Amino acid sequence: MPNHLAAQNTPQLSQLLSMEDPHAVRTEVERLILRIHPSFDLSFIRKVFADVIDLFAGNYPGYRACNTTYHNFQHTTDATIAMARLIHGAFCSGHQMSPREVELGIAGTLFHDVGYIQQTNDDGTGAKYTKTHIERSADFLEAYFRKEGLPGDDIRDCRDMLACTGLTVRIADIRFRSFEVRTLGMMLGTADLLGQMADRSYLEKLSFLYREFKEGKVPGFEQEIDLYLNTLSFYETTKRRFATELGGVNRFMRAHFRDRWGIDADLYEEAIERQMTYLREILEHYRPGYREHLRRWGSLGEPEEKK
């Protein structure tokens, strides 16, 4: 088949799974785990998934509902399915991971942004924890694991994995207990980025990220347009981070799509490239009215603040 016809017949990432449906995401995650380990005990993953849903929804004792509109529960499920796909792709490429390692990788991803969730007596929004959310996420995970009776090694391994989501973290500075945990950490750092940037509403959601950055006092973004202008160079930096600091584990996506869907392509890379191409076009030709060319607000609700 000619290449252009093959491209026309290849589905887009968003067509494979309803990312707005947590049940659909959990079901696909479980399906991928069972393709790796057919006798895998899913009970802990299911409990974590249910508890994290309750946490984001405000049904977890002592905590408010999530009120960050970029780092919300869908971002968590976007990262979690990306993580499961990377683990499955690695398996298809001949890399073996034990059931425990798979379990910790998925659980760690589900907890990776709970640091944005506030306790009931906290004011403002969780965005004020932008600079400290990774450590807060790890602290919550540690308390949860201790309550569930998990050993200290599991806690340490997951804390090390979560550290890999820091955009400036040097992986070489983290003293992982094993090569496998190091690989999972690089996968989590990769899944976190892939999940959000491949979201079909990513460009619209940058407006929400800007508001989080303002409350979190992240420097360098005086106006919303600054974040959009920065995103193109951020993607170039991200690609270099994938290839170097994060060990190129994004290469496992292609093996996943080939085995699971019969598609010989990396649909994450294709989705992100489409986003960046469209953003570049908007900024080159329609910069003063860039918002008018972002049409996927849908149920997101276009932010009132226009800068």
Image (tube, rainbow, N blue to C red):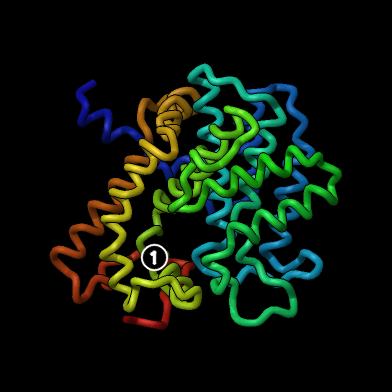
Please, is residue 40 above or below residue 188 in the view? above
Please tell me in which quadrant of the rendered image residue 211 appears: bottom left
Q: Position of residue 306 (x, y in %)?
A: 34, 81
* Residue 87 appears left or right of 213: right
201 left or right of 5 in image: right
The residue under the point 46% across, 75% down is: 217
* Residue positioned 39% across, 72% down in the render: 219
Rendered image quadrant of residue 224: bottom left
Viewer can see residue 18: no
Residue beneath disc 1: 206
- Residue at left offset 42%, top offset 64%: 205
The one nearer the camera, 227 or 2, is 227
Report which quarter residue 100 is drawn in: top right
Q: Residue most toward the top?
A: 94
**Location of residue 153 in the rendering, given as x and y in whole percent from the top left corner:** 74, 38
Kind of residue at disc 1: Leu
Q: Nearer the viewer, residue 127 or 91?
A: 127
Q: Is residue 275 left or right of residue 42?
A: left
Question: Which quadrant, please, contains the N terminus?
Answer: top left
